[in-house]
Amino acid sequence: KVLVGNKVSEGHVNYVIAYNMLTGIRVSVSRCSGIMKPLTDLDFKISKKLVFDISGNELTPSSKYDFKFKDYCPTVFRELRTLFGLDPADYLISLTSKYILSELTSPGKSGSFFYFSRDYRFIIKTIHRSEHVKLRRILKDYHSHVKNNPNTLISQFYGLHRVKMPIYYGKRHKIYFIIMNNLFPPHRDIHLTYDLKGSTLGRFSLPKPTHTVLKDLNWMHDNQSIKFGPKINEIFVNQLQKDVELLIKLNIMDYSFLIGFHDLSKGNDEIKQKKLSIFSPISSNLHDLEKTNPKLLNRLNDLPNIDYPEDGNVFYSNEGGINSSNVNDEASNHIYYLGIIDCLTDYSLRKKLETFWRSLNNDREIISAVPPKEYGDRFLNFILNSINENKLKEAGFKDNNFS
Ligand code: ATP
Ligand code: CA
Ligand code: CA
């Protein structure tokens, strides 16, 4: 469930939206390919509009559907993609409309939709207008943070766009979306996933046989921790502090630390089985296939093939992840996939009201809608008390608030 999603092909309710998003990205990104000049204030304000229609015109090629597309701050995002080590050609190929996306049925409560690029490298997330406003407001700070912090754990934003179209299946006709990194790799099984906020109220998922995203209370109950030797630990703690400092300064809250564990002793059975069911629905037994069709098995192992940047972020340096390590800084039995996600929620009036209403009934320290400084400090405290050994109870985090 976490990896595959439903394919959005012709006839799917969101096919037209997905098609228009990809068409708009392809045309606008390939337009923005001149020489890179140093960014100016104007670059952080500009947006480019494209009008698509069935017949096409001098500016845009013809498209299956009529829609308008807006590309926000294209030169800034182009520089960000370069800073994140993306190859422009790879980016375009992954997001070509020929290969339609997979949709993840809204994993959060916000109503956002998530789409994977065909190689699972990128995620398109539809966002609320207020999140779009927020990203534009913080873009300058975000950009300079990324520039000065090659190891930042904050979500990598590659593009901010809007599709505007006639009312379709009763849906809103202005759709804002971002393109970001998928923290999880397509080629390795993620055996456990946690979405951590540092608040425990209602933060429990019932573990199911299928893959679920677990939360803070599960983390405490499972006595989980992140194992880093002194070398990586220092980089990690430093970076996390800087990242949270920025989020506090930008008046942001409600973000999570997302972490997936790949257990090296378990290997990649799930992914093999998944690929197998895609390619060979009849014989779904891996061992049978090994005997009868070794060629097909090779193809399964080859797919998908992603070139992760090598000189970039240490936390993504092992094909998108980082090895757990022991006291001697030697790699141990896990690969972690981690980052800070969902970081465009402004501590706005809505949140302020939520804090007020909720605090009438609950202890302040366990609810999630607290002001950015409190939120950030608690978040940091939660993660820092989860390194090498789970010290959360000693640190005062409560684990008995089931609701
Ligand atoms: P809410 O506001 O209710 O928390 P949301 O719609 O804003 O939800 P997110 O919190 O951004 O959604 O993401 C929901 C889930 O989707 C995460 O818990 C995680 O499992 C998955 N997810 C989100 N972003 C990423 C990412 N960059 N890489 C991998 N998985 C992700
Ligand atoms: Ca979230
Ligand atoms: Ca959210």
Image (tube, rainbow, N blue to C red):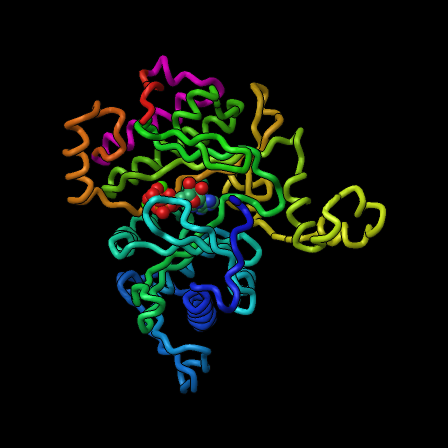
Which residue, as the protein is rendered here, is positioned at the far front? 282
Query: Percent x, y for residue 166?
Result: 32, 73
On screen, residue 259 above or below 146: above
Q: Which residues are magenta?
A: 371-395
The answer to whether 54 appears left or right of 100 in the picture is left
On screen, residue 270 above or below 160: above
Q: Is residue 281 visible?
A: yes
Ligand 1, image quadrant it occupies: top left
The answer to whether 399 appears left or right of 33 in the picture is left
Depth check: give the residue in front, 295 or 314. 295
Query: Percent x, y for residue 10?
Result: 51, 69
Which residue, as the protein is rendered here, is positioned at the far right? 291
Q: Residue at x 39, y 47 (%)?
A: 146
Depth check: give the residue in front, 106 or 19. 106
Q: Residue at x 33, y 54 (%)?
A: 127
Q: Residue at x 48, y 26 (%)?
A: 233
Q: Is residue 342 visible?
A: no
Question: In what quadrant of the picture does the C terminus appear?
Answer: top left
Query: Percent x, y for residue 199?
Result: 31, 28
Residue 356 magenta-drawn? no
